[in-house]
Amino acid sequence: MKVDTLHSITLPNIKEASYRPTSRISVSETGSYSSNRMSFFASVESRKSAALAINGILLLSSLILIGTGSSLMGFYRVQMLEVITVDFLIVPTVLTGGGLLTLLISLFGFMAVAREDTCWLVAYSVMVGFDFCILLAGIISSVRLLIDIQIGFLDSDVMTELSSYETSAWTRYKWDTIQTEFMCCGGYGYTQGYMDWKKTAMGSSRNSVPDSCCLFITPGCGSRVFEVNDIRVVIGKINVNGCLTVMQRRLDTQVSVILIVFAAVGGILVIMQLFVIVLTCCLASNFAQGDDYSVYEYETRSRGGSIKRGRSSETAF
């Protein structure tokens, strides 16, 4: 006799499973999970910290800029070579003046961020933007100056300046300073640089060079030099190498390195200044609205959670 066996299958209660209660997730847990992915700059306090840190870097950089500009003007005397290109005057001026301006702006920035004052922060952003333009102009000038040193340094005509030596107090002071400190005489050429003075009124009428060309400076030591035919006597009395030829050697080996470093560091600084402008504008907006919490904390409060200055309390639905 054949017996059919019935197999019973127990089916799950679909209705019960579909309505099985899920675990509740508190607002603080979702906020904590989201905050792990949150950007560091989402909260006001982190923005303040970042602004202060970058402002400190700008403060230190300003001291370096001031020192570099002062050395270019005081030791290398590059500002006196504006006869070749005006960039010789712009670069050290921007380094020194821009460094002083950056120093003052940085000090003002510390106060603006600490006071959490909207007006101060807006003013700080405007000043940083102005300093950004100055620093950018200095970087462009330094690149141009590098090109002039490598390519066009010896193409300039200095005879116009030498001819105005006796009529212009600034030209006289400038060339006396250059010739004394660099122990040179005239414009271009080794051993023949002093001959450039013979093309001026001083050289053609009185056969003289400025006293600043002399090895040992005394009143009238440069008179009647061109009347001497023995070059050995001339060498024993005055410097014979041209000033621009002597200075170019120092510019190639030392000043060019300074300009390259300034262009590179200045490029980083302008990027940081743009970042500071964005941060301070965000802080000004936050302080104007009275916000001192992060974006995620704002979402928590909008969902019904209570906010306690930087912390969100758990609220169950």
Image: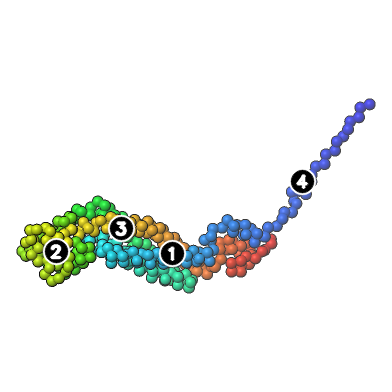
Q: Nearer the viewer, mark 1 or mark 3?
A: 3
Q: Where is mark 1, residue-wise?
A: 57
Q: Residues within 10 Å of mark 2 (few under 14, many from 20)?
A: some
Q: Where is mark 2, residue-wise?
A: 237
Tell me which label, 1 or 3, sits earlier in the chain.
1
Labelled pair 2, 3 in contact (Cβ < 8 Å): no
Q: Quadrant of the C terminus?
A: bottom right
Q: Alpha-carbon distance for marks 1 and 2?
A: 52 Å
Q: Type of residue at label 4?
A: Ile
Q: As drawn, which residue projects farthest toward the top?
A: 1
Element at badge 4?
helix
Q: Nearer the viewer, mark 4 or mark 2?
A: 2
Q: Type of residue at label 2?
A: Lys
Tell me which label, 1 or 4, sits earlier in the chain.
4
Element at badge 3?
helix
Q: Where is mark 3, residue-wise?
A: 254
Element at badge 1?
helix
Query: What residue is shown at x 22% (from left), y 61% (from top)?
Result: 81
Q: Residues within 10 Å of mark 3 (few under 14, many from 20)?
A: few
Query: What residue is shown at x 38% (from left), y 67% (from top)?
Result: 63
Q: Nearer the viewer, mark 2 or mark 3?
A: 2
Query: What residue is shown at x 41% (from left), y 66% (from top)?
Result: 60
Labelled pair 1, 2 in contact (Cβ < 8 Å): no
Q: Residues within 10 Å of mark 1 (few under 14, many from 20)?
A: some
